[in-house]
Image (cartoon, rainbow, N blue to C red):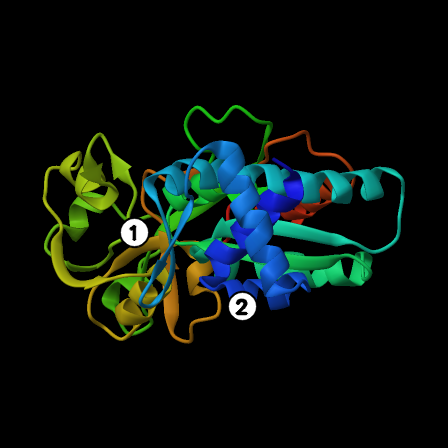
Amino acid sequence: MSLRQMEYLVAVVEEESFTRAAELLNVTQSALSHQIKALERDVGGPLLERRPRGIGLTPMGRAYLPHAELAVRSAVQARRAAKAAAGAAGGELHVASLHALAVGVLPPVFARWRRTFPAVRLHLHEYATTDELRDHMERGVADIAVGPCPEDWHGPVVPLGHEEIMVITSAGDPLAAHRGPVALTGLAERDWVRCGLEPLVEGKRWLDWVCERSGFTPRTAVWTEHSSTAVRMAVAGLGLVAAPVHMARDVPGAVAVPVDRPWRREQTAFARVGLTGITAAFADLCRELAFPGPDPR
């Protein structure tokens, strides 16, 4: 089997079509089909099956695909890394991160990057959960990831700083006039806006876990799917939300109130191979701009 055959397989799966994959790869459909059949002969069985609405994977194909994806993307990353080490101009940098970080702290980083390295094009891959982020990084989707360090990650990890989590509410809420940190116990009777992507701690959703330690169960008014939506719901007066303070920076009328025991979550840059050249430069920029320290109220 060859790397080119793996590349063809990955393209067919991603495009769900031999025709679109052939156009993407700039080869004839017959040549593409021939290479896929050769790959299937080599591995000893069918990898793809035609379905009424496109192309699907056989059980053998599902087992084979992650390894093919990793091989193809590792080869692409190797070429980018070699060019960067040689000081070649231009190129690409693929960055993976959580959606909440992508909309919150990464825009200034990307803006500075474009001014500093205008010839290096950025590709952002956004994921809803840390599990998705880890899975796609293991499959070689990006050169570097920004987010909480996954458990048992075997590649390099570089600490970037801490993301501060505060209670966010509207400017018209009496809590907004509070001076200094607020005791969490004083919020036991308040409604909360929750996000379905809350991390789990000891098998419980994070807000449930932290409030339980203060002796109460949070009263949930609204469930949302994304933290950016939850913040806007809170500012509209539907309840309080515990969210990274950067999520409130560009929301009119949002006020972030710290708690008496600060909530902070470490953020990192991690990758499958060592951070050098442009990946190291990107990590340094994140440390400088994205996580410079606690945000003053």
Report crowding for label 2: few under 14, some 14 to 19, many 20 or more residues within 10 A (C-alpha). Answer: some
Report crowding for label 1: few under 14, some 14 to 19, many 20 or more residues within 10 A (C-alpha). Answer: some
Query: From where the camera sits, is residue 13 visible?
Result: yes
- Front residue of this view, candidates 162 and 150: 150
Q: Name the residue: 28% across, 48% down.
A: 198
Image quadrant in which the N terminus is located: top right
* Amino acid residing under circle 1: Leu
Query: Mark 1 or 2, which is nearer the eye?
Result: 2
SS assignment at label 1 = loop
Q: Position of residue 211 (x, y in %)?
A: 18, 41
- Front residue of this view, candidates 239 and 114: 114
Q: Position of residue 192 (x, y in %)?
A: 19, 59
Q: Position of residue 64 (x, y in %)?
A: 45, 37
- Front residue of this view, candidates 11 and 126: 11
Name the quadrant containing residue 228: bottom left
Q: Name the residue: 10% across, 45% down.
A: 217
Q: Position of residue 45 (x, y in %)?
A: 42, 37
Q: Which mark is residue 121?
A: none
Image-based side of 94 in relation to 189, left or right: right
Which residue corresponds to mark 1? Answer: 197
Q: Which mark is residue 19?
A: 2
* Amino acid residing under circle 2: Thr
